[in-house]
Amino acid sequence: STIGNGMVTPNTSLEIPYGDDETYAFIPEDGYKIKEVIVDGEALEPNSSYTFYNITSNHTVSVEFEKIFHTIQVLCGENGTANLPEINTLEHRSNLMCRFTPNEGYRLKDILVDGDSVGGDSTSYYFGNISTDHTIEAVFEEILFYLTVHFGPEGTVTYPSDEGPITPSDKIAVRVGSSFSLNITPNLNYTAKIMINGEKIDTTDVLEFNDI
């Protein structure tokens, strides 16, 4: 007999000649698996078949089938969020769309599926016809802008606070939304001409950048 979605073959009562052998196969439907095999009232390991050897008495065989479920683990760290909880349990052959949203000041760098990179061009990933467990992880990176400072020997450029010297052609990494300033100090008998992206700026001593 069977319980659930599957079949036993042969699936009828048989008269077996004394001393013969007989094998029964247990076949679950798609999306199901064998949960338990019971032979003569005794629970056995859920194998796909069972053979009666040297039959000398009556026997019974019963099989229980159960649905197959798969787990999708979603990881995204502290610098973004996902539209799904960390652990997702789905039926066999299900579909799942996972979307990631970076926090402000961050962007998606990469998506890892089962440890392999699938790129970071899209903030979503689609699992179709799921037939095994998976993990998916989003990797975020901070968005930084770079200010390149060019100046000659006729003056100096410094931070207002003691953050170290600035040398010609230095690249300054700046976070999104941040603000900072630079002190412009020409040498004696010189004046400063300040340009940002090729445009002249009307200031002579302090250059301020706000909400970058």
Image: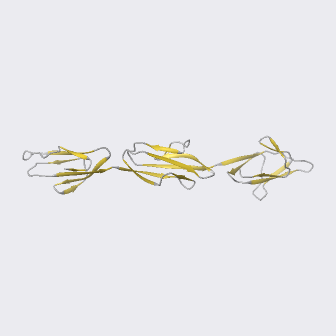
Q: Position of residue 189 (x, y in %)?
A: 93, 49
Q: Residue at x 49, y 47 (%)?
A: 98
Quick check: 114 left or right of 123?
left
Q: Residue at x 19, y 52 (%)?
A: 62
Quick check: 65 left or right of 83?
left
Q: Position of residue 142 (x, y in %)?
A: 62, 50
* Image quadrant in which you'd find residue 197: top right
Q: How is the image coloured?
A: secondary structure
Q: Position of residue 149 (x, y in %)?
A: 77, 46
Tag count: 0
Q: Position of residue 80 (x, y in %)?
A: 56, 53
The residue lying furthest to the top in this view is 198
The residue lying furthest to the left in this view is 18
Q: Nearer the viewer, residue 172 or 64?
A: 64
Quick check: 187 left or right of 33?
right
The residue lying furthest to the bottom in this view is 162
Quick check: 127 left or right of 178?
left
